[in-house]
Image (spheres, helix red, strand yellow):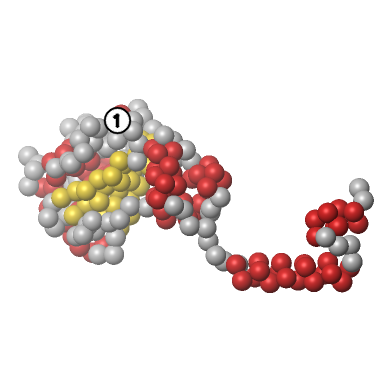
């Protein structure tokens, strides 16, 4: 390849001094733009959510929209409801399916589904679950209290009482017959959540 000819085609000159000057100017422009992150449009974010709900990985979204994976996560991250002290993410393998924000004080939950697959949603077709729905969901992700070796299993976990929330935390809500699991995240007021997450919280509903 004739590089001198190529320089003339690209930069209009093959003079070394002129080419160095052009290179220096380009370097200055890149320096000024360093660290500037590409912003996604509202339409891009909508497409990201649609693709994510369809099962696209974070890496695939990052490549498609030419942004970092961390930036994709920031755009797709959901806001936390007021009063919530714990966030559970219902996962299928590595894909988030339902985000559950828990308000123990007011006994409320707020959810955002991340998949269109009803079978992979924490509450199926229910869009506005009640506290009772949440408790039933937790029980469904635990071994039954009537299980013969229940006491032994609790002892192995370091628990003294049957509490679905604490059991799910220990086991990540994993069951032998599916690939769903739970990811737990305590929000800033951790001590408040812990206070309501113990046996006393569920005890009123147990026989």
Q: Nearer the viewer, residue 41 or 36?
A: 41
Q: Position of residue 170 (x, y in %)?
A: 32, 47
Task: Give the vertical position of 169 relative to 39 (above or below).
Answer: above
Give the camera-side residue of 20 and 121.
20
Residue 59 visible in the snapshot: no
Q: Position of residue 150 (x, y in %)?
A: 23, 37
- Residue 194 screen position, x and y as percent: 22, 58
Q: In the rendered image of this protein, does residue 188 appear above or below residue 81?
A: below
Left/right placement of residue 46 relative to residue 145 reads right
Label 1: state its secondary structure.
helix
157 shown above or below 34: above
Report the residue at 17% width, 41% height from top: 129
* Position of residue 105 measured from the top left corner of the image (x, y, whole percent): 13, 57
**On the image, which quarter does residue 172 sit in?**
top left
Q: Residue at x 61, y 71 (%)?
A: 32
From the image, tell me which residue sits under label 1.
118
Q: Is residue 187 left or right of residue 162?
A: right
Classify residue 55 as left or right of residue 181. Answer: right
Q: Nearer the viewer, residue 183 or 202?
A: 183
On the question of residue 25 being in view, the answer is: yes
- Badge 1 density bin: few <14, some 14–19, many ≥20, Cα 10 Å: few
Q: Residue at x 21, y 38 (%)?
A: 127
Judge by depth and name the residue closer to the eye, 189 or 123: 123
């Amino acid at each position: 390849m004739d590089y001198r000819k190529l320089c003339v085609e690209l930069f209009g000159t093959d003079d070394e001094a002129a080419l160095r000057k052009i290179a220096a100017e380009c370097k200055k422009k890149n320096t000024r733009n360093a660290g500037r992150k590409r912003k996604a449009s509202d339409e891009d974010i909508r497409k990201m959510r649609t693709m994510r709900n369809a099962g696209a990985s974070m890496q695939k979204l990052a490549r498609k929209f030419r942004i970092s994976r961390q930036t994709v996560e920031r755009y797709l991250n959901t806001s936390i409801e007021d009063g919530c002290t714990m966030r559970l993410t219902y996962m299928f393998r590595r894909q988030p399916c339902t985000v559950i924000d828990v308000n123990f004080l007011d006994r409320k939950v707020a959810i955002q589904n991340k998949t269109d697959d009803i079978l992979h949603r924490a509450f199926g077709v229910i869009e506005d679950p009640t506290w009772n729905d949440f408790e039933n969901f937790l029980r469904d992700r635990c071994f039954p209290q009537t299980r013969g070796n229940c006491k032994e299993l609790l002892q192995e976990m370091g628990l003294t009482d049957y509490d679905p929330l604490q059991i799910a935390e220990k086991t990540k809500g994993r069951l032998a017959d599916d690939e769903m699991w739970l990811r737990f995240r305590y929000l800033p007021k951790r001590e408040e959540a812990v206070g309501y997450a113990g046996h006393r919280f569920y005890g009123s509903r147990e026989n």
